[in-house]
Image (tube, grey):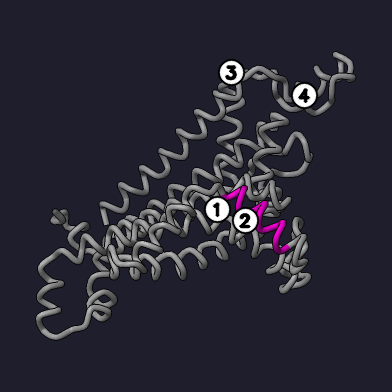
């Protein structure tokens, strides 16, 4: 229990440090948020009035303390560009990114892990070599390029889906699925290749251990040994890479959301940065930092469930 409390404290400290660095960085970067909001044709008096209204003239310490106070009360501020609460903007975009992440992760797990096991099983024989080559190609192709190819084939040539845009699940579940399946595939393809590689290497390392030979000598076939014994012991590096992939997708698949014009948190972050919308940027950074540290925390917990020796500090 004490170990988990230490991790929780480290999570909170990490998020606060990230927020502090982000806040100070945007103070150093040249530019005026009031100018971004009003445009170059506004008068100087308008800039001054808006700066005073937004509290941009206050000292750095006061603005930081005011934002942190609002953070603990659930108030992330008002977006300078959209003039609505930051929390409302993020919550409005979350369903898109979460749906995209769930679909992509399902593809990654259902395809990547089985193919990695098959690749390890056959090793240097033809099926293993073919899977390895295909996975290397998948890792080399950027997701945005895969997205463009998928749009061209399935959206323009075959006309199976409408490329770009998003249909909410509440309006049309099938339409939402069609609007997300291509970007989910584009995100999943390079990640599937990574999971295949990690699974293959981890399973092959485990197959060199004595317990595999012992199980085989007792008459178990190779498939049973792989699924009942080897896979569980090989899961730790696989879970690690899946955690990183999950954090990346939930943090906002910026390029894919741009390619498919999806209204997710990735596009929201790009808009916030380009317009110097400081409250929105801070809210987005908080969201991304929270996602990353939470996922890392749960990965550590899963580690101890899979291998209790980690919790006891006995793992070699």
For label 2, the crowd category at 10 Å Cα-Cα, with few meaning under 14, some 14 to 19 and many 20 or more, is many
What secondary structure is marked by label 1?
helix
Contact between marks 2 and 3 (CB within 8 A): the answer is no
Q: Which residues are magenta?
A: 143-154
Residue under circle 1? 250
Q: Earlier in the sequence, mark 4 or mark 1?
A: 4
Residue 147 within the segment the image draws in magenta: yes
Look at discs 4 and 1 and give the one toward the viewer.
1
**Disc 1 packing (10 Å; few <14; some 14–19; many ≥20):** many
Label 2 and label 3: CA atoms lie apart by 31 Å
Q: Residue at x 42, y 54 (%)?
A: 194
Q: Position of residue 315 (x, y in %)?
A: 16, 56
Residue beneath label 2, please?
97
Of the two numbered discs 2 and 3 on the same chain, state the one appearing first in sequence: 3
Say left or right for 272 vs 226: right
* Magenta-colored segment: predominant secondary structure: helix
Task: List the residue tagged with mark 4.
Answer: 34
**Above-or-below relation of 122 to 39:** below
Placement of the N terminus among the 4 image quadrants: bottom left
Q: Are marks 3 and 4 in contact (CB under 8 Å)?
A: no
**What distance separates the C-alpha of mark 3 from that of mark 4?**
16 Å
Q: Secondary structure at mark 4?
A: helix
> Of marks 2 and 4, which one's residue comes earlier in the chain?
4
Report which residue position mark 3 lands on: 28
Q: Disc 2 versus disc 4: distance between alpha carbons?
A: 30 Å
């Amino acid at each position: 229990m004490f170990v988990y409390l230490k991790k929780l404290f480290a999570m909170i400290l990490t998020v606060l440090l990230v927020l502090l660095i982000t806040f100070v960085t945007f103070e150093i970067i040249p530019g005026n948020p009031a100018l971004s909001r009003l445009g170059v044709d506004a008068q100087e008096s308008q800039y001054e009035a808006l700066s005073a209204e937004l509290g941009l003239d206050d000292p750095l310490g006061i603005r930081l303390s005011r934002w942190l106070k609002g953070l603990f009360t659930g108030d992330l501020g008002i977006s300078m560009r959209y003039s609505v609460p930051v929390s409302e903007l993020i919550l409005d975009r979350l369903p898109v990114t979460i749906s995209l992440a769930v679909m992509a992760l399902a593809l990654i797990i259902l395809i990547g892990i089985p193919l990695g096991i098959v690749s390890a099983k056959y090793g240097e024989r033809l099926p293993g070599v073919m899977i390895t080559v295909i996975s290397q190609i998948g890792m080399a192709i950027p997701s945005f390029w895969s997205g463009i190819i998928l749009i061209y084939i399935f959206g323009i040539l075959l006309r199976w889906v409408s490329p770009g845009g998003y249909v909410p699940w509440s309006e049309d579940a099938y339409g939402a699925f069609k609007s997300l399946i291509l970007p989910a595939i584009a995100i999943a393809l390079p990640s599937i290749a990574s999971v295949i590689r990690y699974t293959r290497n981890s399973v092959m390392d485990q197959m060199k251990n004595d317990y595999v030979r012992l199980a085989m000598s007792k008459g178990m076939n190779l498939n049973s040994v792989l699924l009942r014994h080897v896979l569980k012991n090989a899961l730790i590096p696989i879970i690690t890479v899946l955690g990183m992939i999950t954090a990346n997708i939930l943090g906002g698949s910026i390029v894919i959301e741009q390619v498919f014009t999806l209204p997710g948190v990735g596009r929201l972050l790009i808009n916030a940065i380009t317009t110097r919308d400081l409250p929105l940027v801070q809210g987005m950074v908080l969201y991304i930092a929270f996602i990353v540290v939470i996922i890392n925390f749960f990965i550590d917990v899963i580690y101890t469930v899979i291998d209790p020796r980690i919790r006891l500090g006995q793992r070699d």
